[in-house]
Image (spheres, coloured by chain):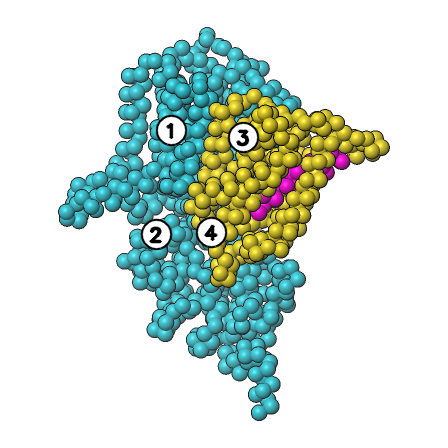
Chain colours: A cyan, B yellow
Amino acid sequence: MTRRLLPFVVLVAAVALLNGWLYQRFHVRVLTLAVVWALAGVAWNLMAKAGQISLGHSAFVGIGAYGFTVLLREGGTSPWTGMVIGMGAAAVVAFVIGLPTFRLKGFYFTLATISFPLILELLVSHYGEPELTVPFHPENQWKFMEFSNAHTYVWVGLGMLIVALLISELIDVTSFGFALRAIRDNEVLARAVGIRTVAWKSAAFMISAALSAAMAVLWVKAVLRVTVAEEVFGITVVIVMLSVAFVGGVGLTWGPVVGAAFLIPLAMFLDDSIGEAVPGAQELVYAAALVLVALLIPRGILPAAGRGCRWLATRLSPTPGLPVRQLLQRVVAPPPRPSPLLSVPRRPRRPVVLAQAGEAPVLEVENVAKSFGANRVLSDVSFTVDAGTRVGIIGPNGAGKTTLFNIMTAHLRADAGRIRFKSIPIDRIRAPRRYELGISRTFQVPQGFGGMSPLDNVVVAAIGASVRHPVDASMAMLERVGLTSKALGQLSALTVAEIKSLELARAMVSDPELLLLDEPLAGLNEAERDRFFQIVDDLVAPHTAIVVIEHSVRSLVRYAESVVALDEGRIIAHGSPDDVVSDPRVIEAYLGSKWMERARDQ
Amino acid sequence: MTEFLQFLVPGILIGGVYALLASGLGLIFGVMRVVNFAQADFMMLAMYLSWALFAGGIGMDPFVAMPGIFAVFLLLGMAIHWLFIRFVIGRHENHDAQVILTLGLGLIFQNLILIRYSSEPRVVAPSYANTGDFIGDIFISRARLYAFLLSLLVAALLFLFLNRTGTGRAIRAASENWEAATYMGINIDRTNRIAFGVGVALTAVGGAALVTFQSITPFVGLRFVVVMFAAVVLGGLGSVSGAFVGGVLIGIIQSVSQVWTSAAVKNVWVFALFLLILYVRPNGLFGKVQRAI
């Protein structure tokens, strides 16, 4: 807890000290701006926690600035009320523009966000007022945020900054933060383990937008004194947000505070000393900072400083494990968090209908078809899987096996056909909800959340399934697959077999009723192969049905109770393993028709 | 109808220039998957170079200066790639560094120009700048017509370069699949460098074609950056020919919108269309639609 409290104490002490010590107008102005931009950066960084780089945040700053100015001019509304209304409006706008925009991946999102402030600026300038002066209300300092003492703005700003930082910290330690980090690391996988990516991103975007709007009110009242569309909706707003966030540490709660502490005074003092002769000096500071960070320390100062301190500590410490070194690490570079602090346990969302052996099949696939352009990948595929059974799927490369899995887990949408899970039609149900219903999977190319420990990889899946004690459940699952000793290490330190085990633990932590394994034995040696299915059988509940795609027909025949053979998107054989592997059509599909003809000729 | 045509024809003409601007951006993205936010600022630099050559005593016509501008920006682009861009290529899992690097570079260009030339708008006005011809009721500006014809010429040359030369083929191979291209013995770093240079030079030539009817400020790029992205996304990110078609379409929409709304908000239509395309067909008008649930 001290580790989380300490930065707050340092921040308050530093600002208080400076606020008491500085008396020149310009110096207080620099301090105010540093606090304002730190606040803006913290707001912007909330989206970066999910790996989303927004270039559209000036839309929210503009909404906040215009909102309160118009309310104050037209109705004499207090800027505080205006701030709350502006925050609400920004959040609503963020929700509306987020819904379509969050479907866009990676830099498509970044591209789309540029347009919003540009559209708003043009509309406001043309149909509204390009410039609004903020009326002067000296009669009530607190009501109208019209402080005669410039230091008061710093205190107000500090208060707002602390609130923003607390929100950011709170997100980090709850399942909210887990969801955002999961989205950042691997969005497809996040959806496959029950993370409702659009909902979480929307929530982060709305909070981020509201804080940006709040910052705008303080910025205009304390510094600008006039609301100019070109300025508050302008790209420079985003540039400064980006700069302070990236310089300090992108996605990190305290990053923007560090970034603003470095950059804002530098830019301001440079502007003050040479601004007359060199009009773009301030912007050059931000630009140079962006370029340098991109080339030298892409994650920002904080992570780089952490690495530097660890390196230095290792170098200086004569004996590893020296208390001094631990202290240093703890203060400057906290080691990877061992586990999440809390996750609000939610009501289990599973329907009460539980599949029981002997009743309707767990999975019913009916006439499923899928094409990619002119390439028909699946046609008329139908089969059922009973509770507690193991079904193997075989077929040559390109037969459509993985596509079939992707359709079952809603990573792809079928062109035709129906799928029922526990008698529920699930065709229109999205990936996270299917996971919650009880469908888990592993991937042909093993997937993971690269920025998280193996434990946290499983915890995300546990949170996605609303498991009551996600950390305990995940740890227990890791123990059962034999990964206890690696639980807190680096994901990249795992061997292929260990990654496969981790995938299994992640897929099993939700106690699924249908487990889909996509080529689980690929890359494993003989001994590991034999062990793998033992672990699976050890983990699954008796009612869990398992569908396995596997090229190792020998292992599969021993394991599965029935086998489906696919070729060119059609089921060519379905039955007991022995029947299927001796079916001539299956042999032909695997070995080719020429071989069959030759075999017949001889 | 005439009113419509009066906006359509200039739309097509300016669209040709947008196509040229966008083709450079599209080429760079296609080859090295870099979204270059500084692209419009290379255009701005080229506009200043044209202005300097025209107004700075030599009186060189922008269209005459164009081969020289192409050469200068080819080298500048290659230098920028060698100095900066190559360090952020290949981090496929993370586009953050590319975004902030190119944004930062663009901002540096803008402010260096601001320091050197102030924010006063500059104009290049050769004798044909404000003349034109009537075809029927439709006025065709000479400057825009020349710019359009130039765009067609450059498009043809680009097509020949990409299809008939070894380097051009290497660029196309790299944009199809750079990993496979390396196995075929293509020097990917050199290919990227040349592609970046050519991409920057194409946009620079487009910028030089604009100067006879577009006033020049250090921040002129901001007005064009989304127009360029819109054209590229419309045609399908990474497709040079798509970027050409996209550019012409954007020009038409921007211009024809003035039939209904004020010229001041013509770019709102472009931005709205850009968003619509991203949402509905993120792979461009001609790309495949792939939809997950």
The reply to whether residue A245 is visible in this rendering is no
Question: Subunit of mark 2?
Answer: A
In magenta stretch: residue A309: no
Q: Amino acid at mark 1?
A: Leu
Query: Comparing marks 4 and 3, which lies closer to the viewer?
Result: 4
Q: Which residue is mark 2?
A: A453
Instruction: Answer yes or no: are tags 4 and 2 on the same subunit.
Output: no
Q: Nearer the viewer, mark 2 or mark 3?
A: 3
Which residue is under mark 4? B189
Residue drawn at (32%, 57%), measured in percent from left and top?
A493
Question: Does B22 appear in magenta?
Answer: yes
Q: Where is mark 1, residue-wise? A: A263
The CA distance from mark 1 to mark 2 is 33 Å
Looking at the rendered structure, the kind of residue marked 4 is Asp
Instruction: Work out whether residue B80 or residue A217 is closer to the camera in this orientation and state it.
Output: B80
Q: Which residue is mark 3?
A: A59
Magenta region, residue range: B7-28
Q: Seen from this angle, which residue lies furthest front? A: B58
Q: Label 2 to label 3, Cα distance in Å? A: 36 Å
Badge 1: how crowded within 10 Å, few (<14), some, or many (20+)? many
